[in-house]
């Protein structure tokens, strides 16, 4: 993790680090790095900020979509 931050120039974002570990706790050494967390289907990119310390990576990579129901169709009971 620290090697990626050392190799980047000033004012540039570091390269993304891919992981499947949602139960990994964010440490102070991870601040200002970009981590891609797998959510079961793809990777969610997260830029780690100081406010994220002591939280899990999985809290920032939601694995489900909220279900939104449309209007009832022609054959529906409550149409």
Image (cartoon, rainbow, N blue to C red):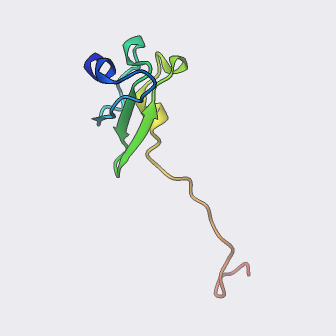
Q: In the figure, is residue 20 to the left or right of 29?
A: left
Which quarter of the rendering shows the C terminus? bottom right
Q: Residue 29 falls in which quadrant of the image?
A: top left
Along the line of sight, which residue is nearer the eye, 1 or 70?
Answer: 1
Q: Compared with residue 59, is residue 70 higher up or lower down, i.e. above or below? A: below
Task: Tell me where residue 71 appears, x and y as whole percent.
Answer: 69, 74
Q: Compared with residue 49, is residue 68 higher up or lower down, i.e. above or below? A: below
**Furthest-top residue in this view:** 28
**Furthest-right residue in this view:** 79
Task: Tell me where residue 43 appears, x and y as whole percent.
Answer: 36, 45
Along the line of sight, which residue is nearer the eye, 55 or 45?
Answer: 45
Q: Residue 38 falls in which quadrant of the image?
A: top left
Q: Residue at x 33, y 32 (%)?
A: 15
**Furthest-front residue in this view:** 10
Q: In the figure, is residue 32 to the left or right of 4?
A: right
Count the labels in the image.
0
Which quarter of the rendering shows the N terminus? top left
Along the line of sight, which residue is nearer the eye, 15 or 49?
Answer: 15
Q: Residue at x 36, y 37 (%)?
A: 36
Q: Residue at x 42, y 28 (%)?
A: 12
Task: Tell me where residue 66 appears, x and y as whole percent.
Answer: 56, 53
**Furthest-bottom residue in this view:** 74
Q: Compared with residue 12, is residue 30 higher up or lower down, i.e. above or below? A: above
Task: Tell me where residue 59 appears, x and y as whole percent.
Answer: 48, 32
């Amino acid at each position: 993790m620290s090697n990626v931050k050392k190799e980047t120039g000033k004012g540039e974002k570091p390269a993304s680090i891919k992981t499947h570990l949602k139960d990994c706790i964010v440490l102070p050494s991870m601040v200002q790095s970009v981590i891609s967390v797998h959510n079961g289907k793809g990777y969610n990119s997260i830029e780690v900020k100081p406010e994220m310390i002591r939280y899990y990576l999985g809290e920032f990579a939601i694995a489900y979509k909220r279900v939104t129901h449309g209007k009832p169709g022609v054959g529906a009971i409550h149409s």
